[in-house]
Image (tube, rainbow, N blue to C red):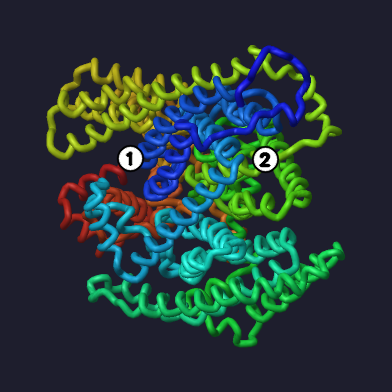
Amino acid sequence: MENKGIATKPFSLKNVPRNDEKKSIIFWLLISFVTSFLFWAPFQKALFNGNTVDFERPIYSALVWISLIMFLLAIYFIYNWSLITFRDVMSILVWLLPICYLLSTFSSASSYYSANMLYIEIMYTSFFILGLYLSRNKLGSNFIEIMFLFSGYIIVLFGIFHWLGNGTYIYNLFKWLLIDVDDNSSVYRDAVMGEEINGIRLTSVFQYANAYAAYLIALLFSTIFMIIKSKKWYFVVIHSLMIVPILVSFMLTLSRGALVILPIIALIILFFFKLHRQFIFLFYFLLAIVTSFAILSKINNIGVEHFKNPSNPTLTGGWSVLVFAALGFTVVIVFVQMVIMPLLKKYLDRWEKYSWVNLILPLTAIIVGIVGISLLFSDSGFKNMLPQNIKHRVENINFAQNSVLERGTFYKDAIKLSKDYPVFGAGGGAWSALYEKYQNNPYVSRQAHNFFLQYLVEVGIIGLSIFIIFLVLIYYCYIRNYFKSSNEDKERHFIFFILTISLLFHSVIDFDMSYVYLSVLLFFSLGALASNVQLNQKALLRQWLDKVPQSNFIINKTYPILLLVLSIIMFFISLRLLSANSSFKEFTAVTLTSNDYNTITKPLKEAIKLHPNHPNYVLQKVGILFQVYNQTKDEKFYTEAQNLLNGLNAAEPYNRQRVAQQIYAHQIKNQLDKAADLAASELVNFPWDITLYEDTINLKVQLGTAAKMEKNIKIMEQNWNSVLEVYNTVLLKTKYLETLPGEQQKGRMFNVTNKIALGVTQIYLLRGDYVAASNLLKPFVTDQLDDATNRLVARWYLAALQKQQLNDQTLYDKLIAKDAKEKQQIETIVNMN
């Protein structure tokens, strides 16, 4: 808003000038950016923040763009921003969220993860501010709503094309549009994904079915609402045509959690409608369910068949069924919307004077929903209408299934983690960095599957409390204003309300917010909800704002200037990150065509220079340096590798690959004591990593054997006793896994391996416990003797038998036939003291 004159009189609504964004070039540039983002970002795997180098490039590209947008916002604010309204206050308070992430970097478990998350949080904050100011008028709000829906329709069609076997058309379209995809592009390949237990699931651009299902909930109810409020028949037609494809896509995700969330969101929406709209909303929703279920088996079977045998000719039957059902649904909806709804409104308006009347239908819907759920899970035959794979998923909705039990474990482990970092958290990406240290069993999940718990471990109680207060404030003000506003004002931002509650509710049970695209939608929508909140004169914030001079230069110019400075800083940071990623991408390409050290490492050096202590970049360089050192024995290569590891140790103390490389660094220098001590000390950070137990036992056995050769009995016993302690830990943990519920998957393999058994057997044998030695090794004996470890097992097993005056002649003959030197090796073991 423009500030005229120098008067410092208190705020008054009469003094607020009207905004004229229609004539603002910056306004339209910002609208264009948001629109472009809605169509670009989904096809970058929805900007999934997977905390690996594979996912970071699109995110860094988005950061470059958002820094330019921040710059434009700052310029706009310099001439138009004043601390006057609730919107202006929220544009400042929202920065508390990235500030919490900034504070958490000082105690972060991973410098790389925490820095990335700080930059991403700044992106979210920027989109929140965009939502605040682009949605405050009807033009901006309506335009972005339409673009959100249309981009969603494209995502739905993208998924269905792949499900029905027409993904090649999408691939060719990408090529025609000069979008960089190759024959193995995941955008082309993984829109439909197969699972060993559940069969195939529709994932579209998200490549994760549950996140796609959450998005479809928001899209479905937003589309229905758009139909309800539309007064033009052609708008009703456009949106109605997409309802059936959306709901069919939703069912094909096989997302049980989303299936539970769907009626909850529908029920919440009902409470915001007047009686006639409640009837219409429920009718459209139920009709969509009936129509979709009628064709679901046909569409499902085509997708399953195509997935099993993609070389079959493209099946077109699915499209004809889908289009026919969508058209039939649309005809009914247009008739109801244009003819029945006005009559229904006219008839039911007489009841609006009774405040309780709008509660009747939602409460009835709860009862009907309970009956429907009972039918679905009973033997009534209702669920037999579903395709077999979907029926199987529905039947398995209970609290004794792996996904529920596993999520419960994640949540308990997240609480354990947060207790060690209670105030400011362990930084962005803390769960990915630390979950292995706190996990109850050896599952693999770099996501906590709960947005709020993941937020807790990242920014602690302080950060989570600020975020929850932030949400409560926005929803309280929005809902309060909603029920006091006219019908037109109520409609303006309700799609954004649907979007936020859909994503937030589902994110309680999954990691939807790890998709930067979905989080951007959430924060933009939250900004939109806060954009038109009005405060009455009695409100505390209103009384405070009344005392703020409208033309105070410090207040009205400092914030835009700080935003301008931050945008410039972010531009150069994001540009460096993107350039580093480009150099690393060049490095990976060069490794396929060249073996020259200088040629290979040149782009890698540049990547590390631009993005120091990036774990992927540094560890790639370390691996190459160790290879060259082993070939040349030139100390400069070893020294450089060790310096890189030392720097990475400070930045990434919980990086498992770094630990492995450091152990290897000690081994190639024959520093077995340092390697063993490091491996043993890291067991507390990776208590379910069986390879670390193998390394610890192997190294301690070597140290004990070396001490024995030197007749240093004390050191020998210390190392061998350590081996047995580690071995007993493995046994105890293996026994604990047997106590987990039978329905819960145990996770990664964790038990006594042939390498562990081999190390412990050597101690048993050298201590004279020959029976224990042979019994321990026997389960691992195999005649697959091409493998070196299998030959070692056979060698020590046969030696243990000979110590007992026994033999396995068949195994012995096979081993000697494989390598005649094994005879001497066995005799050496047998003759050992």
Residue for point 52% across, 25% down: 76
Using the rendered image of the protein, determine whether residue 569 is visible from the camera's viewpoint.
yes
In this view, the mark in front (2 or 1) = 2
Using the rendered image of the protein, determine whether residue 420 is visible from the camera's viewpoint.
no
Residue for point 57% across, 60% down: 226
Where does the N terminus fall, quadrant-wise?
Answer: top right
Local packing at callout 1 (Cα closer than 10 Å; few below 14, some 14-19, many 20+) is few
Type of amino acid at the residue the image marks with label 1: Met
Decide: is 224 above or below 653: below
Type of amino acid at the residue the image marks with label 2: Asn
Decide: is 679 above or below 202: above
Give me the C-alpha separation between circle 2 and circle 1: 85 Å
> As rendered, which of 343 and 428 lies closer to the eye?
343
Q: Provide the residue designation for mark 1.
A: 832
Q: Position of residue 670 (x, y in %)?
A: 31, 25
Image position of 36 (left or right of 414): left
Decide: is 248 above or below 584: below
> As rendered, which of 579 and 499 lies closer to the eye?
499
Q: Position of residue 151 (x, y in %)?
A: 44, 54
Q: Provide the residue designation for mark 2.
A: 532
Q: Element under label 2?
A: loop
Image position of 246 (left or right of 366): left
> As rendered, which of 565 and 810 lies closer to the eye?
565
Which numbered disc covers residue 625?
none
Q: Quadrant of residue 105?
A: top right
Residue for point 74% across, 64% down: 274
